[in-house]
Image (cartoon, rainbow, N blue to C red):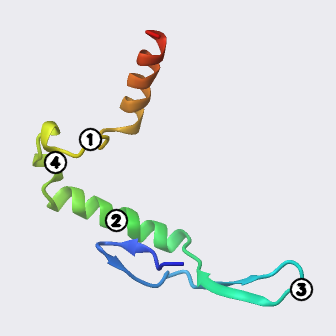
């Protein structure tokens, strides 16, 4: 598994690592990052900085990638399209 991607870089999880064991015999299958609350808070802060300091808020909607709009807006548009079928 890859490390969490936060603030434009891959890095080890701040909340530590966890062992994955095979259920059949309990042998160690691997060790993975255990991203938790601290990692979540860091990711949210990085996203906020990227929004506040990056080009996104000044990018016209037509220049943004398709599907980059708000998920609720996409769901409403889909629901409307379903009603016209």
Which residue, given by chain and number where applicable, does mark 2 sit on?
A: 45
Pick whichever of labels 3 and 4 is earlier in the sequence. Answer: 3
User: In x, y percent, where is residue 32?
Assistant: 60, 82
Q: CA distance from mark 4 to mark 2?
A: 16 Å
User: In x, y percent, where is residue 5?
Assistant: 39, 73
Q: Quadrant of the N terminus?
A: bottom right
Pointer 2 local density, CA inside 10 Å: few below 14, some 14–19, many at least 20: some
Q: CA distance from mark 4 to mark 1?
A: 16 Å
Pick whichever of labels 1 and 3 is earlier in the sequence. Answer: 3
Residue 66: image tag: 1
Pointer 1 local density, CA inside 10 Å: few below 14, some 14–19, many at least 20: few
Q: Between residue 17 and residue 22, name the one nearer to us.
A: 22
Vertical relation: 29 (above or below) 80:
below
Q: CA distance from mark 1 to mark 2?
A: 25 Å
Residue 57: image tag: 4
Task: Report the mark closest to the observer, 4 or 2.
Answer: 4
Q: CA distance from mark 3 to mark 4?
A: 52 Å
Task: Report the mark closest to the observer, 4 or 1.
Answer: 1
Which residue, given by chain and number where applicable, does mark 3 sit on?
A: 25
The residue sitting at the top extreme is 84
Q: Which residue occupies 80% across, 81% down? A: 22
The residue sitting at the right extreme is 25
User: In x, y percent, where is residue 31?
Assistant: 64, 87
Pick whichever of labels 3 and 2 is earlier in the sequence. Answer: 3
Q: CA distance from mark 3 to mark 2?
A: 41 Å
Q: In this rendering, would 35 be left or right of 66?
A: right
Circle 3 SS class? loop
Q: Which residue occupies 85% across, 86% down? A: 26
Pick whichever of labels 4 and 2 is earlier in the sequence. Answer: 2
Q: Which residue occupies 29% across, 44% down? A: 68
Circle 4 SS class? helix
């Amino acid at each position: 598994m890859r490390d969490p991607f936060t603030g434009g870089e891959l890095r080890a999880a701040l909340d530590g690592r966890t062992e994955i064991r095979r259920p059949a015999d309990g042998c160690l299958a691997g060790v993975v990052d255990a991203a938790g609350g601290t990692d979540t808070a860091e990711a949210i802060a990085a996203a906020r900085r990227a929004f506040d300091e990056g080009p996104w808020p000044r990018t016209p909607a037509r220049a943004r990638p398709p599907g980059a709009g708000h998920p609720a807006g996409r769901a409403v548009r889909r629901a409307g399209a379903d009603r016209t079928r």
